[in-house]
Image: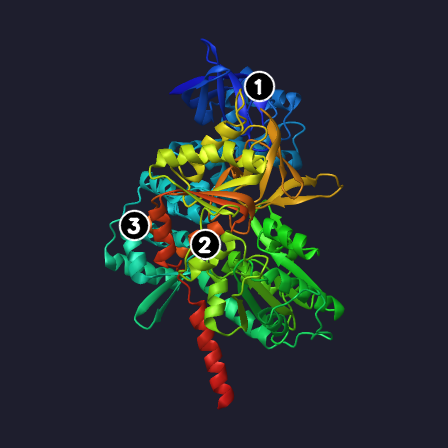
Amino acid sequence: MIITGEIVTVIYQNEENHYHILVVDTGEEEVTVTGTFTKLAMDMQYEFHVVEKEHALYGKQYQAEAYKLLLPSGSNKIKDFLASGLFEGIGESTAERIVAKFGEDTLDIMRYNPDRLKEISGIGDSKFEKIHASFQSHLEAEEILFFLNQLGLSVKQSFKIYEAYGTHTIEKLKRNPYYILKDVKRIGFKTVDEVAKKLGFDDHAAERIESIIVYLLDQEAMNGHMFLSRSELLRLLRSMANVPEDLFDVAVSDLAVGGDIHVEKVETEIRIYAMNMHKTEIGIIREIARLQHGMPKDLSYKGNFSKLDLTMEQQIAVDQAFIEPMYILTGGPGTGKTTILKELVLRMEASEIKYALAAPTGRAASRMEEVIERPASTIHRLLEYMYQEDTSFLHFQRNYENPLEVDAIVIDEVSMMDAPLFLKLLDAAKTGTRIILIGDVNQLPAVGPGNILRDLIDSGVIPTSELSQIHRQAAGSLILTNAHAILHDGELGVNQKGKDFFFIQESRQNKILDTLLDVISLRLPKYYHIDPIESVTILTPIRSGALGAEGLNIALQARLNPQRGDKVFGRFLVGDKVMQNRNNYSIKWTRIGTLEDGDGVFNGEIGKVETADKRGMVVVFSDGKRVEYSKELSDDLVLAYAMTIHKSQGNEFDYVIIPMFHMPEPLKSINLIYTAITRAKKQLTLIGDTRVFQDLVHSQRVVIRRSSLAERLKKVYEGAFKDDKE
């Protein structure tokens, strides 16, 4: 539907995201038009391509999907247009002089013969440059955005593309629209593929095949894989596009020659990497070799500072941590990793060893700080990250040129650290720095690419202590003893009076949901005297569906936080538990009760909506950060009454409920159920089908990540030892 009319009023305008609510006079009536727009001229004619919407409060509105300025005709209209404030260097008097000179030919002259503006009194070289640049830029932007809109892109997507390519947008897209996938965030392959088809690219175009290959490698990296085998990549490619094998091989060859991918043969398997993933693996090996040849500062005191009753296993682990430059400590919950960490810190302090404590997430760092009673930070903060908004580039100020000034770096929850971040950490450690890595190798691996902790242990090149003995104080917890039993296919204890591990049998999904809502809203609060929003978290293996995180959050919000009235941004209410769903390095925050402020809220941080209205809302996070969210920023928030098990990594919750139901085969693993169970501190309730639970427990299937890191490390070190012997 097309509406043509003059803008008579701007009801609302957001300077950050350019969202507007306009009143437009069509000549027959005044209508409300909403959308994202660049600079607009009042009382000028625009053509809006719109969709009719019905707003609950404000009635009928028109949402603009595309728009363009209709250049005015007639001297008076042209003069008003030039004096509208759109163009730098043109005010009322200058507009009058220009139109007096050129009349109705003014706009054509300004566009195609702009030097003639210098004929007008008062327009010298400097002013001419301002007027010309501003006029051309505005008209060009209008044309480009309309061009993009006509390709089926939303106004928001069009803005992003125009910001990336500017005046070269049309030329760039006609040459290869698939550049968008690499250069513009949050525009997916399907959208770009539709644009390419409208621009005349056929299904077997080289640009398309190469872009799909790069896209698939990037997607699989997001799924945790460093590479794909040739056969798997070809299979995935053919699931998206019917591409002949010979064209696939040509595309792979061209991408390899161009430096976009790396191809190597390992025995009979051909492995294909995105180039950044290959460089990451090689870089990690290089940095480990460098640090392994360093001479870290040694302990001058080796006594038991913590005065805790260390087991023989723990005592050996503490001593071994300072034998080699790099060391790994792994073990399940209740085996004493925290006790060992406390002892390590006290020994380093007594020996005047300067150290840094860090973890991959804010939640894990906060917990580390609580239990050790020493400052800890995220790895990002340790490396002093800087986010450049104009380029969306994340830069770490600590690197090989500006290393961390510490003698030892201790990282907790290493299973959550992906390969690229691990490389950045090693890169920032000067030669001679001691690296101590702590984590549970049986947890789910990081959401990002790689399986760092597992690969390092499997390589055998870094000394490792694996704790297996459960502490006396932990042995009374069925949560902990069952977690260890799962790993060793042992007997499980459930539903014992006074214990902390319960299972409620329900087979049908609707009954599982009903029981879950009853347990969280009535049974647990009544028995344990707790606030269910503050104390209870639901963990589920999937995101979608009635028992997925999204469906559960809607049901839990209605049950635990029932309020009348409109939800803010259609989703949130005051009192809601929410979670940041992606890293935002530039968002501002202040700390409650302090004068501290800063930038950055990270993926997985959990908070509560403190205040909310139609202008925005304020969220207070668990570490005391208070953050203001606009509508655009709120896109990064999700409800957090329930979350996926993957999202729960690094967190611990007092009370946890897990629905047990049939799930997709690729998700089933012993790592999944082990990670879920070990998130609970005080009490765990599973609700669902015992057969599903038993299948997960006894399958002994582990998560596999496609990575060559372990075997590369083995080969490098075997070669080094062989050379030493010779």
In whole angstroms, how far apart are the C-alphas of marks 2 and 3? 46 Å
Task: Tell which circle, 3 or 1, labels the residue nearer the N-terminal end.
Answer: 1
Q: For mark 1, does the 10 Å Cα neighbourhood hold few (<14), some (14 to 19), or many (20 or more) residues? A: few
Residue occupied by mark 2: 674
In whole angstroms, how far apart are the C-alphas of marks 2 and 1? 54 Å
The kind of residue tagged 2 is Tyr
Q: For mark 2, does the 10 Å Cα neighbourhood hold few (<14), some (14 to 19), or many (20 or more) residues? A: many
Q: Which mark is residue 205?
A: 3
- Residue 628 is situated, as x and y percent measured from the top left of the image, at 63, 34
Whether pointer 2 and pointer 1 mark residues with C-beta atoms closer than 8 Å, the reply is no
Assign a secondary structure to mark 3. Answer: loop
- Residue 352 is situated, as x and y percent measured from the top left of the image, at 75, 69
Q: Is residue 281 visible?
A: yes
Residue at 35% across, 54% down:
213
Assign a secondary structure to mark 2. Answer: helix
The kind of residue tagged 1 is Ile
- Residue 695 is situated, as x and y percent measured from the top left of the image, at 34, 52
- In this rendering, the label closer to the viewer, 3 or 1: 1
Q: Which mark is residue 540?
A: none
- Residue 490 is situated, as x and y percent measured from the top left of the image, at 41, 60
The kind of residue tagged 3 is Ala
Residue occupied by mark 1: 11
Check the image and name the residue furthest to the front. Answer: 497
Answer above or below: position of 535 versus 464: above
Q: For mark 3, does the 10 Å Cα neighbourhood hold few (<14), some (14 to 19), or many (20 or more) residues? A: few
Assign a secondary structure to mark 1. Answer: strand
